[in-house]
Amino acid sequence: MNARENQIRKRRKNVNKFRIIVSAITIFACVTLLFTIFKQQIQIRNINNVKLEQQTKKAELEKEIVKLSDDSKNLDNPQLIEKYAREKLGMVKPNEVLIKDEKEKPKKDTNFTPSPTFDKESDK
């Protein structure tokens, strides 16, 4: 019986070693999986933040496109061009007298560059 008991003990030792190895591999795999999931969650959060920033920029640019589109439509309207020239640039028609209030300062648009069609030479 002694030989049989030794065989049983060896088998139990082998089974215990196998269980320990399988348990260690399983624990390692679980820990690795948890770290991977955590890392991916951080990446997803960062990507969502970038996405939100890009959507905000897109909305701002779309508003600017609409504004510029409206402005470009107004470039063909002579009344609006004249109004802009009078109010923003302080221009007057020939033979007109400009009366300015000293308290009121003229507002000039620094973004506006007059086109060559407003030159006096083109009026002749």
Image (cartoon, grey):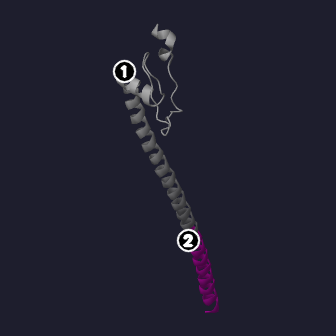
Residue for badge 1: 78
Residue at image location 60% in from the left, 78% down from the top: 20
Q: Secondary structure at mark 1?
A: helix
Binning the other alpha carbons within 10 Å of mark 1 as few (below 14), some (14 to 19) or many (20 upward) gives: few
Q: How many marks?
A: 2
Any part of residue 103 in sight: yes
Percent across and percent down for residue 87 are 43, 30
Residue at image location 35% in from the left, 23% down from the top: 79
Rendered view: 87 above or below 93 = below
Q: Is residue 72 magenta?
A: no
Q: Nearer the viewer, residue 14 or 101?
A: 101
Q: What amino acid type should be assigned to the residue bearing mark 1?
A: Pro
Percent across and percent down for residue 30 are 54, 69
Percent across and percent down for residue 120 are 50, 13
Confirm or deny contact between disc 1 and disc 2 (CB under 8 A): no
Q: Secondary structure at mark 2?
A: helix
User: Where is residue 33, by image quadrant?
Assistant: bottom right
Q: Left or right of 76: which side holds 17? A: right
Give the farthest residue toward the top: 124
Which badge, 1 or 2, comes first in the chain's sequence?
2
The part of the chain drawn in magenta is 1-30
Q: Nearer the viewer, residue 120 or 116?
A: 120
User: Where is residue 63, by image quadrant?
Assistant: top left
